[in-house]
Amino acid sequence: MKIHTPLHPLTLSRAGIALAVFIATATLCSASFVLVENFNSLSTGNINGVNGWTAPDDNYTVIDTAPASPSDQALSNGTDVAYRSTPDIAAGGLGTLYFEVYFNDILAGQSFGLTTSSGTAAADYVSQMSVNVSGDFRIRDGGTTRDVDNVTLAADSWYQFWMTMDNSADTWELYVKGGAISTQTQVTVVGSDSTFDFRTTPPDSISRFLLSRGGSGNGTAVIDNIYLDSSAINLSTPTIPETSHAALLMLIPMLFVGVLIRRKRCQLR
C-alpha cells in the first residue's frame, strides 16, 4: 500500500489563520469608507434621475474622461444643485466625507458638502466648502462665510478633500491634498481656526451629498470618487488593498489541498 504523507497540521493552521486575517481585514475595509459614487458605471450625459441623483436643471453631466482624472468617468458641474443620498452619519456620531475635484477654471462659484435627507439648497448645508466666482477658497462656519488662509487652490489640478463631521458637537473640519499641496493639510481660516460650526444643525442624521452653484461663476468643476465613512474620523485615502485578491487566491489552493488531504486520511483509516 502506498503511504500518503499528510500535510502537517501547523500548515493547515497557518492557512486558517491567514484566512481569518484576510476576512478580518476585508471586514475592516468594508466598515470604513463606502463608495457613494465614482460615475464609472453610468451612461454619459445628464445625471438627473440616474442612480439616485437629482439635478433639476438637467445640466450636471457625466463625462467620458475628466482632465487628468484618476477614473474613467466623472461629473461635470452645472447650474443650481445636484444631490444624492449617502450612508447616514447618525445623531451623536462621527463621519467623514471624501471626494475629489478638478477645476479647469478656479472661478467656479461651486459649493460642496453634506446635508440632511431633505436638504436641497445652499441654505440647507450642514458642512459647506466653496470656490466663489472670484476664485476664493471658502468654508462656512455657522452663519459666517470665512476665507481659507493657509492653502490656495489652482486651476488644472486635482484635489482630494476630507470633510470630517462631529454630529454630537455640531462641528466639522476640512483637509485637502493636491496640486501644490503635496501633503494632507488641515484647512484653517483667518485667526487660525480649524474647527467650524455646522451651517444648519441637523435634527438627526446627516445623509445627503449636495452640490450647489451660485453667482455668475462659469468655471468648470469636475467631481469624482465620492466616499463616506459613516462611523469615524477617517483621514485615509479610500482604496481597495492591492494584495487582498492575491492573498485570497493564494489561500484558496492551500485550503483546498488541506481539505483533500484530510479526506484522503479519513479514507485510509
Image (tube, rainbow, N blue to C red):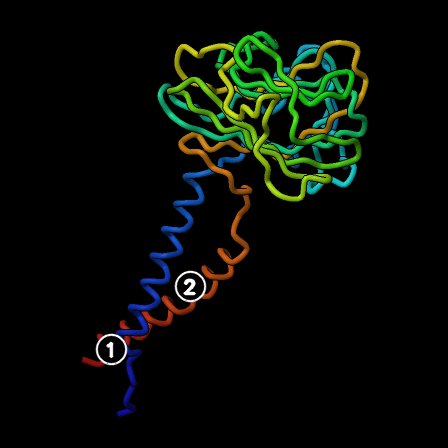
Examine the rendering and report whether any part of residue 40 can be seen: yes
Could you tell me residue 56's position as x and y percent? 67, 10
Q: Secondary structure beneath disc 1? A: helix
Q: Residue reaching furthest left?
A: 269
The kind of residue on which mark 2 rests is Ile
Q: Nearer the viewer, residue 131 or 14?
A: 131
Amino acid type, label 1: Arg
User: 238 above or below 58?
Assistant: below
Q: Position of residue 38 (x, y in %)?
A: 62, 34
Residue 47 shown left or right of residue 188 in the figure: right
Residue placed furthest toward the front: 191
Residue at label 2?
252
Q: Is residue 49 visible?
A: no
Residue 139 vs 72, above or below: the answer is: above
| Mark linked to residue 100 | none
Residue under the point 55% across and 13% down: 125
Q: What residue did someone put label 1 on?
A: 265
Of the 4 image quadrants, the one containing the C terminus is: bottom left
Residue 48 sits in quarter:
top right
Of residues 31 and 42, the one drawn nearer to the viewer in this rendering: 31
